Amino acid sequence: MSERVYVHVDCDCFYAQCEELRDDNLTRVPLGITQKYLIVTCNYKARARGVTKLMSISDAVQKCPELVLVDGSDLTPYKAVSDRIMDLLHVYGNVKRLGCDEMFVDVTDEVKRRLGNATPARVMSVVGHVWAPGKDSCVRQDSIHRVMDLRAMNNNKEEHRTSRHRPDISEELMEKATTQELFVGADVASDMRRVVMATTKIRMSAGIATSQIMAKLVSGLYKPNDQTILLPDFAKDFLASLNVRVIQGVGSVLSQKLAAYNIINVCDIWTWSREKLVDTFGEKQGTFLYLASQGRDPVDSLIVADSGEPKTISLEDSMRICSGFKEAKTLLDKLSPDLVYRIHAHYQKYGKLPATLTVTYRLKEAGLHERHACSTTMPKRLGAIEVSATALSVLETKLHEPFHLSLLNIAAKNFQHAPSHSIQLKTSHDGLIKSKRELRMARESHSRQDNEEDDTSFWRDLNDVDTSLARPLGLTTTKSNKRLATAQRKKITSFFKKKE
Ligand code: TTP
Ligand code: MG
């Protein structure tokens, strides 16, 4: 096979489905999952009533007064379901997790196996949809907050449920080996979705393509609970009129840079040669832009077998405002003990220590997605005081008072094998932690307000909204959140136990 076959899966209204597992009654009502004053997601019944992801609770309740709200601030049950799905997908190929509810699977070998060594007999029946330019090919942005969430314009039409969207594909294209391989890939995707559904009761949508970039873009076209193939010959047709932000890896900073050169839509990149892109944006970014604009992945994007070892450990806190180095220090002092604790746990499991400490911050006046990162060498003595002080000094090289931050993140990266004597675990004030219990207590006392980061996630951006706004609407208090979280955890655990 000359091309790889990738499947991108994305769970439908993920947190809402997890809550529906917890309480079956929720499947019958429009449901919104809340964090602070926002609806982070809602089930499709609520969506049909005009509620959207990231809508404020007050707007959502206005649109749909019967909306049932469930607090989703404890991610534990969602992570448990997500891990379970990951485990199930490994059977089909190497898996890369992209976020809590989305994963890429390289199904090339599975497709090869299904096709056998013989020349593939022509696959006649195709599972799901096939995107092709022409009538019915228009796509729209599903949410004003998320350019990359694309839906087919004809998605809402009732007929798409009964008659699949099968554009006319030329005989020549049908005969192509890649087309046939993608059709088999669609079979694999369908099996995955069926197995995940049978085991976890979670519905997913999927995209099938020869690049990860395109598989992700088409996977939501016919959400919920459906799948779409994109043939490489149509990649440029699909991308042409889309905003550059739809490309995974083009964030707000890069898109602003591109806008300065009048590059707004993907087709604008085509007017530039690869050389010009490299000259202007550097080797790595220029090549990435060139390939991505053709629907191709970056050169180093092969999904390797997952050792389960995290590449980064990070913690962050968001706040209404943090002005000046004194306040930044207080925050870093709060985050560092937990980071050190996690580095220690990582060391015990993998025998590796991080060589790099990265501090990321967001300026209050900047947009939600605009972050700045600065890195330095991890201090040799790995105590919370040392980590905090090092993080502060690197921040001092970047910022000048007065400044106002709305988010601060510290991350340990670049893990390397290290001898045992090179780690010394300390809390910020008690000196060395001796017992496991002390370790746990130190961790708990420092991590209560922190938010663990999922590397590719933007979810953390919700943390800078003010919880007090949620209270008048009758949302749960921290104490009852905790009770709810415990109940959720129990339910999810018992759900999986029952399945086993
Ligand atoms: P998404 O996949 O974007 O949303 P979804 O799965 O709820 O809905 P869809 O059917 O459109 O895929 O995100 C996955 C989960 O992540 C979602 O259930 C809730 C959470 N989330 C946040 O916490 N913050 C956010 O800003 C978004 C968009 C999602
Ligand atoms: Mg999803």
Image (spheres, grey):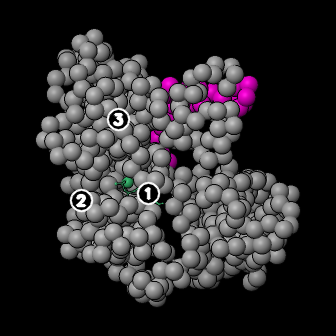
Query: What is the span of residues highlighted in magenta in the rendered image?
Result: 278-307
Q: Earlier in the sequence, mark 3 or mark 1?
A: 1
Element class at badge 2: loop
**Residue at 27% from the left image edge and 51% from the top image edge:** 224
In terms of sequence position, does the residue under pointer 2 or pointer 1 come before the other? Answer: 1
Q: Is residue 310 left or right of residue 277?
A: left
Q: Secondary structure at mark 3?
A: loop
Figure check: 39 above or below 303:
below
Q: Mark 3 belongs to which amino acid?
A: Cys
Q: Is residue 80 visible?
A: no
Q: Is residue 207 left or right of residue 214?
A: left
Badge 1 residue CB within 8 Å of ligand 1: yes
In the displayed orientation, state which residue is furthest to the left: 162
For the residues labelled 3 and 2, the Cα–Cα distance comes to 31 Å
Tell me the residue at 86%/62% (across/down): 400
Q: Which mark is residue 138?
A: 3
As shown in the figure, which amino acid type bears the numbered disc 2? Answer: Lys
Pointer 3 and pointer 2: residues touching (CB < 8 Å)?
Answer: no
Query: Please, is residue 92 above or below residue 464 in the view?
Result: above
Q: Which residue is mark 2?
A: 201
Magenta run includes residue 290:
yes
Foreground label between 3 and 2: 3
**Quadrant of the image where one finds ligand 1:** bottom left
Q: Quadrant of residue 357?
A: bottom right
